Structure formats: structure tokens, C-alpha cells
């Protein structure tokens, strides 16, 4: 396990990452909707995250990302909470097949 400070988020990755799926020269990841109300007006729950992770893996995304800030403030001054990053990526590692080998969680 190694930390990736480039986006300020914790990450899990293998020490020698293989080329991305299909030999693509560019790796592509997806950031999960962890903020309150960010998923079509509702807050994503564990079954939503597990499904996002499985689908992202199935279609070939190389990484899953979650921010590690606990509060966000929008332009109107409203504060929104998010799911805690370390716990979420630990749980995502359990439901993905390639988290420690080919995929990356951050």
C-alpha cells in the first residue's frame, strides 16, 4: 500500500503497476459521487458504491477515486459532507477483483 498525495486522497496500488487494460498508453479513472446529494439529488449508499466499482472494473476503468475532504462548501455557502475516504476505499478493495493487482483506488 502506498499513499498518493497528488490529489490529496489516500490510495491503494500495487508497487509495480502493469500497463493499463488493453495496452492503452493512457490510464483512465473515475471519481465516485461521495458528496451528499451528488447522485441525482440523493446521497449514494454502500450498494451504489459497490455497483459503481463493479461496473467501472467491468468496462475497463483503471482506477477509482474518492476525495478526502470531509466538508465541501458550495457557491451559496451551503456545507455538504462526504463519506470518509479511507473506509470507503478499503471496502471498495474488497468488492473489486483487481484493486491490488491491476486497478488503483485513490
Image (cartoon, rainbow, N blue to C red):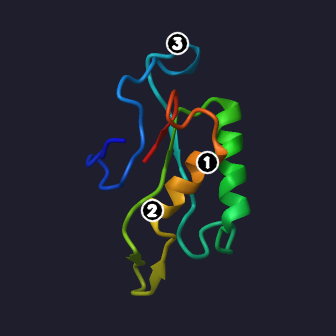
Q: Earlier in the sequence, mark 1 or mark 3?
A: 3
Position above or below: 97 against 83: above
Q: Report x, y in % for residue 69.
A: 37, 69
Q: From this viewpoint, which residue is outermost toward the top?
A: 23
Name the residue rendered at 53%, 60% in the picture. Answer: 88
| Structural distance between the alpha carbons of marks 1 and 3 | 25 Å
- Say which of 2 and 56 sits in front: 2
Q: Secondary structure at mark 3?
A: helix
Q: Report x, y in % for residue 87.
A: 49, 63
Relative placement, left or right, of 81 versus 59 is: left
Position above or below: 38 against 105: below
Residue corresponding to mark 1: 94
| Structural distance between the alpha carbons of marks 2 and 3 | 29 Å
Position above or below: 6 against 24: below
Residue corresponding to mark 3: 23
Q: Secondary structure at mark 2?
A: helix
Q: Secondary structure at mark 1?
A: helix
Residue corresponding to mark 2: 85
Amino acid at each position: 500500500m502506498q499513499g498518493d498525495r497528488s490529489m490529496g486522497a489516500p490510495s491503494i496500488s500495487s508497487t509495480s503497476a502493469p500497463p493499463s487494460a488493453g495496452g492503452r498508453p493512457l490510464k483512465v479513472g473515475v471519481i465516485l459521487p461521495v458528496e451528499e446529494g451528488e447522485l441525482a439529488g440523493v446521497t449514494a449508499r454502500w450498494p451504489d458504491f459497490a455497483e459503481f466499482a463493479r461496473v467501472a472494473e467491468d468496462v475497463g476503468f483503471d482506477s477509482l477515486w474518492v476525495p478526502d475532504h470531509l466538508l465541501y462548501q458550495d457557491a451559496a455557502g451551503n456545507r455538504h459532507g462526504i463519506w470518509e475516504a479511507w473506509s470507503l476505499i478499503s471496502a471498495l478493495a474488497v468488492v473489486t477483483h483487481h484493486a491490488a493487482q491491476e486497478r488503483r483506488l485513490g
